[in-house]
Structures are given as structure tokens and as C-alpha cells.
Image (cartoon, rainbow, N blue to C red):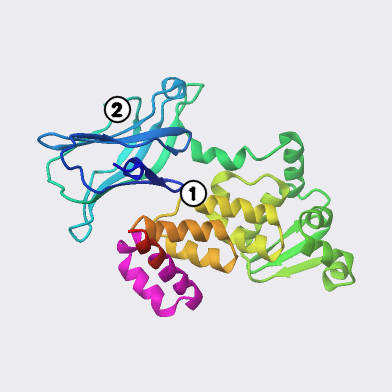
Amino acid sequence: MSESAFRVETTARLAQWRIDNLGSCTYRKSDPFKIGNWNWHLSVEKNRALYLRLHPEISNLTRDNPPIASFIIRVICSADDRKALTHPEITDKQLKNNDDFVWPIEVPFTGKFIIDVEFLDLKTASPNGGEPCSIWAEGFTTKQSNETALACLGRMLTEGINTDIIINVSDGSIGAHRAVLASRSPVFHSMFSHNLQEKELSTINIPDMSIEVFQAFLRYIYGNIKHEEFRTHRLALLQAADKYDILDLKEVCHESLMEDIDAKNVLERLQNANLYQLHKLKTSCLRYLVKFGKIYDIRDDLNAFLQCGDRELIADIFNEVLNTWKGF
């Protein structure tokens, strides 16, 4: 049996194990695969029913800090027009060993089939005994440094301390500081360094951005944006980062948009990846659609996209399909 028979393909939150044929085997366990902070295993056991298990690899991390997982798991029969059997959504289930999640499947599966696990969230127990904490909510906030300095900088914005520039957006105005804007954006630096209207009048007009989005943009620049605010506005923040050449914000948006690709947003993410030249996001979206077979789950949306989408991007999708088929 080839090594690939035990390999699980993964993207940020999705794991997929392709089984060509169980044959006479009554038990098969996958190679370990990493999602979040843990290595995981899938296993199938064939008895009167097919027993499917998902569990973390036993380690000190698992014993001391076991994952609390929310996920959707499906079995897809490749030979039967991708007929799928889906387990009811699992929410906040602590998994320590291979008996914590067992799915007995009475429906017989023959030939090739795919086990598909989409992790919705992974949490760990709070060290203070409070509510469990999502590991995916930590990534952005832990990048902030020097909390005292950032808090003071944030106060300058929220309390309007010595502001010297007014920004007029589509539905309001807000004060800010030239020095802060210029230090974070080459575009703003250019505005204030030359004899442009913005320098002379001490105002900037940005009619293509709402006050809510621009406040989030400024809070990122000043270092006091909250995680949920960032996630709510990350597509608009990506546009602003590209327009004002703030590379760190663009990269943070890029990384965040790769974390939760799903069937509802994959085409929008793909178009934004193409527009803003986000290679990793584009690759992840194409893999999600083609290698993981999600292209079959969004046929109506895909048909609409094919009618009016970017021709080069459509060609990229078809090339990905053709390259994937070569591997079969």
C-alpha cells in the first residue's frame, strides 16, 4: 500500500483523507496531520458498521491542554456522484483520546471515498477557570507590542489629543495626527511633504470610505484595533492597506483571510486575492475549490461567476482542474 494512502491533505481549517479502497482491511489509521496547535489522526474500522474516529495525537500537550473542537465531518462517496453523508455539527467537544468522537456509519461505502473535516473553531481551557479561549482569536492580538505605548497612542486618537488634520469621509469627519499617518503610510507622507492641497488646508477627503471603516483603519494605524473589529472590516481594510501602501496591514489581512475560507466566501476571496495580488490566498482558494472538491458544492455560484468573472481568473480555475486531474 502506498504512503499516500495514509496521508491527510490539509489547508488552514480543512482536512481531507482520500481512501481508495478498504478492501479486506478492517482498520486503517491516517498519518498525523496538523490543524491548530495539535497533531490529529483519523481512523476507520470496518465491522458491522463503519466506525469513524477523529482524535488528537496523544502527547503532553493533549494531556495538559486538550483541544475543545467544533467541526463538521462528512463522508463523500466519489463513485456515487459525490454522494455525501454529514454528521450533525459538533460544537465545543473536548477531545482527549480516540473514543471521544466515534461516528458509526450504517450506510455501506464501497470503492473510493473521502473523509472531510472542516474545523469551525478550536479552543483551549482558560488558565483562570473562565470561558475556553479560541486559539484563532489569539493570532492577531499577540502581534501587538509595547502595550503601554500603544495605549497612549490610542488615547491620542480616541480623545482627539492635539490633532492637526481632519479627514472627511463619505458620512462624517474625524481628526488625526499628520506625524502618525505619515510614519505609517508612504502615501500620507507624500501628501504632507509636498505642497499639495492636503498640506495647505489640513484636510484630507476620502469619499470612498465610510466613517466606520475609516475609524477601524485609524485604530489599526494607532495600534488599538480590537480583534472582532478587525475581522468585521478586514476586506475594506485590505483595500485601504493597498491604497495607502501599508504593507503590514495588507499582510495581516492576507493571513487572516486564509484562516476561514469556506463555500460561502471562497469565490469572493479568490477575486480579492487576484485583485490585490495575494498569491497565498489565491493558491489556498484554488486548492479548496479543486483539490478538496468544493467546486461541486457551489455549482450555482460558480456558474454565475463564470458568466461575468475575470477571464484570466477563470482560466486559472480551469488550469487548476486540469493539473489536479493529471494526478489521478
- The disc, 1 or 2, on the residue closer to the chain's N-terminal end is 2
Q: Which amino acid does label 2 sit on?
A: Asn
The kind of secondary structure the magenta stretch mainly shows is: helix
Query: Residue 11: x, y in percent?
Result: 44, 48
* Residue 313 part of the magenta segment: yes
Query: Hey, what amino acid is under mark 1?
Result: Glu
State the separation of the CA atoms marked 1 and 2.
26 Å
Mark 1 surroundings within 10 Å by alpha-carbon count, few (fewer than 14), some (14 through 19), many (20 or more): some
Q: In this view, does 191 lie above or below 154?
A: below
Does residue 231 belong to the magenta stretch?
A: no
Q: Relative to the observer, which residue lies in front, 295 or 192?
A: 295
Q: Name the residue under label 2.
A: 98
Element class at badge 1: helix
Q: Is residue 34 visible in the rendered structure shown here?
A: yes
Q: Where is residue 151 in the image (x, y as percent from the top left)?
A: 72, 39
Stretch in magenta? 294-321
What residue does disc 1 label? Answer: 259
